[in-house]
Amino acid sequence: MCDCCSSKKDIYLPELATVKKRKLMNGTELYLLIQLDSGEELGHKPGQFVEVSIAGIGECPISISSSPTQKGGFELVVRNAGSVTKAIHKLKVGDKVGIRGPFGEGYHIDQLKNRNLICICGGLGLAPQRSLINYILDNPSDFGTLTVLLGTKCYPQRFFREELAKWAEGDDMTFKETVDEEHDCWTGNVGVVTTLIPKVESHLKDSAVLVCGPPVMYKFVLMALEEYDIPHDDIYVNLERRMKCGVGKCGHCQINGEYVCQSGPVYRYSEIGAMPEAI
């Protein structure tokens, strides 16, 4: 059981928190900076998630998008895709929400230290990967090289655009980006995210590859990685889309005997490769 579930916190009782910042980054993704009213830091690890509740509406699981190294609150990216997320999109600065968590095991940083890392993100998968990416950037001496490949369906759906520009211009990572569809404002690569993998072929040897994106993306990214003979132990996938209650009670995230909300949502491909329903 993870540390967050064995602490004195009541995992069933939401903590009161306040919206400190909000920004609609495109038509569907809302950025929120949230601070616990207790004044304490959330104490999360990259790859974990929280349950966000709105009084009278319900709650939903949202991946944490900020690094644990960031103080003064934590960041979420919320897509308007249901009754609870619709209510979250109506929040204003100063409004109150309930927070449970953090939940899940997230990324096992000890397995990634001193490794060269390749993060492959698709669409909203950038949000949870951003927590890890910024953690790596804040602790460069703990890791090898960092490569980030990002694919988005279309140019208007890109978010964290200013941050992406800094990643592209900086010298602390290799950053490559693509969009699926041509657009007048886009002069970069056009095609799905797998078209970026051959462009970093020299980075693939002896690297750990971390994949997060929509369900349809996993099949094709994993097929592409097979061509480079990357050991399945060195490929990590994020199954955060399966989250529901966060405490292993509802069964929504169960895969065989695994409760993704407790032992995941990040798994080595070798752990789930034999479970086709996982991908």
Image: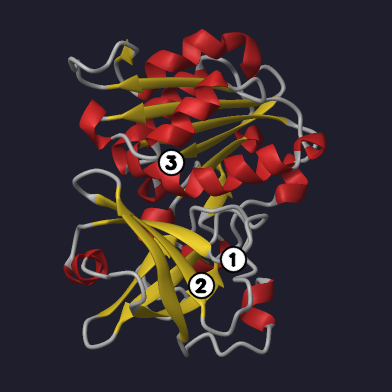
Query: Percent x, y for residue 174?
Result: 59, 20
Query: Percent x, y for residue 187?
Result: 30, 11
Left or right? Give the position of 188 relative to 141.
Answer: left
> Which color scheme did the rendering employ for the protein?
secondary structure
Q: Within the image, what quadrant is residue 196 found in?
A: top left
Q: Which residue is mark 2?
A: 35
The tag on residue 72 is 1
Mark found first going from the N terminus, 2 or 3: 2
Q: Nearer the viewer, residue 272 or 35?
A: 35
Q: What amino acid type should be assigned to the residue bearing mark 1?
A: Gly
Q: Are marks 2 and 3 in contact (CB under 8 Å)?
A: no
Q: Which residue is mark 3?
A: 126
Above-or-below relation of 188 to 73: above
Mark found first going from the N terminus, 1 or 3: 1
Q: What is the distance, in whole Å, between disc 1 and disc 3 at their CAs?
A: 22 Å
**Quadrant assignment for the N terminus:** bottom right
